[in-house]
Image (cartoon, rainbow, N blue to C red):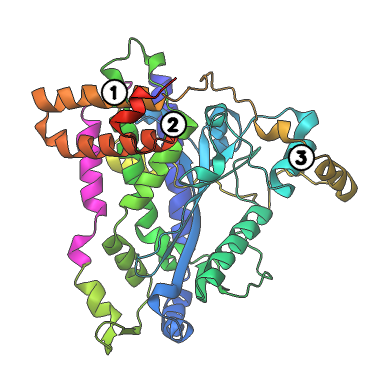
Amino acid sequence: MERARQIRQQLGDSVAGDFKAKSASVDNITVDEWKIRLPLIIDQYNPNDIYNADETGLFFKALPDRSLVIAKEKCKGGKKSKERFTILLCTNMTGTDKLKPLVIGKFPIAIESVLLTCILTFVAGKAAKPRCFKNLNVTELPVKWRSNSSSWMTASLFDDWLKSVNKTMMSQKRKILLFIDHASCHNPESQYSNVTVKFFPVNTTSKLQPLDQGIIKNFKCYYRQYLVKHIICRCAVAKSCEDIVITVLDAVHWTNNAWKAVNQSTICNAFQTSGFKCSIIQPTVNVMTDISTLLDQQCDADDVPSALQTLDMLLAHVKIGEERLSASEFVEMDSEIPVFNEGNDPLDKQVNIDETFRNQIISQNNDDINIIGEEDDVPAETPPKLVEAMEMVRRLHLLAAMEQPQLHHVISQLDSQLTQLFIESQGLKQTTIEDFFHKK
């Protein structure tokens, strides 16, 4: 037991040491010079058209157990690697447009099928599905889902995402300025008609990138609130620890909800901290307004401390192992895991695709590989039919009437929507009493 405790402490110190080293490497002179130049860079853009995007790793099944805190190098393979996402988040400066998260999951593949699977996934544009997605249309998910053998961002995935954003901006007749870091998967030579890409100075993102100034942390606070609530609820009916299951689909919905929960104040404060200050024209009043004044009015509304406090309160109801992580430790546990291929990664971990073989595979258009088997031992669930859901809602009305009256409004809304969907699904049309007497 004592040896295990020492190992956990060493791993924790390793992560902390790596983070401190990165912070110390920031050149403050470069940071200051950038903040002086930044107003000139963004001067021609409306704040609604100034964006920042960044990837973050997420152990989507991780529990608040201190023994799960692991060093960065341990995250490149094995079980922990399989249970993580790389998530790309993107928002504009005013927090009025948070783009749909791009979630990159991992699927297990045999060595002999590496080329085939990668080609079908990346080149043919097919997002391999976890088993829990079997009955779902991936395009209807609340996030953009992609997967590969490492769950890392790649240059091709990032380029595809940028093309999608550019297409959206073209349809909206907007031209935006997107700030990103110098990750090796971000191609500096790519150009787009409606998206201008601007890179932060090297090794300065811990100070200059808005998403690193509390936005990602706030997102993870909310995500882990959903996870802990799920554990608490499942404990009420679970007969053993094995009954508390977290699926990829659960994590996808929590990712979407957590991103929606990040408020404008948190986003505006993060951009301001990073030096994004400019004069804007407010269309409603048609006068010049200093955006920093608007942001200052919202400084007290920063949601990060509140979200951490709520998470700490939830964690008080969960006991896993001997040492429970604090809310802050739980949120930061995956802050340093890799999200893209680093320059010093072994060559055998990088996949090179032969052009001729790739074209042969694409021409076959094999749809059967779209579903990739997972080793999570979670069977695909069958969704209830509409009539079954309507019966569930009827029972929820009993719950509201007898114990939880505050739920009446929400349940009634759900009841109304389900009833309307049922009517539409049956193709029912208006009838008269006489119609019933003329049935054969």
Extreme residue toward the bottom, this view: 287
Q: Which callout, 3 or 1, points to the residue nearer the camera? A: 1
The x, y position of residue 236, in whole percent, is 25, 17
Q: Which callout, 2 or 3, points to the residue nearer the camera? A: 2
Residue drawn at the location 46% of the way across and 42% of the way down: 58
The x, y position of residue 267, in whole percent, is 33, 63
Tell me, yes or no, whether the highlighted magenta stretch contains residue 313: yes
Q: Which residue is mark 3?
A: 348
Find the distance from the CA under tag 2 to the CA under tag 3.
Answer: 28 Å
Q: Which residue is mark 1?
A: 392
Task: Please say if the residues under marks 2 and 3 sit with CB atoms less than 8 Å apart.
Answer: no
Q: Is residue 185 above or below residue 176?
A: above
Residue drawn at the location 62% of the way across and 63% of the way down: 163
> Which of disc 1 and disc 2 is earlier in sequence?
2
* Element on which disc 2 rests: loop
The residues colored magenta run 299-322
Which image quadrant is residue 284 in?
Answer: bottom left
Question: Could you tell whether 434 is left or right of 195 in the image?
Answer: left
Q: Which mark is residue 61?
A: 2
Task: Please say if the residues under marks 3 and 1 sit with CB atoms less than 8 Å apart.
Answer: no
Residue drawn at the location 57% of the way across and 31% of the way down: 130
> Which of disc 1 and disc 3 is earlier in sequence?
3
Residue drawn at the location 44% of the way across and 73% of the way down: 50
Find the distance from the CA under tag 3 to the CA under tag 1.
Answer: 52 Å
Tag count: 3
Q: Nearer the viewer, residue 1 or 298?
A: 298
Q: Amino acid at mark 2?
A: Lys
The x, y position of residue 310, in whole percent, is 21, 42
Query: What quarter of the picture does the C terminus occupy?
Result: top left
Question: Could you tell whether 386 is left or right of 416 in the image?
Answer: right
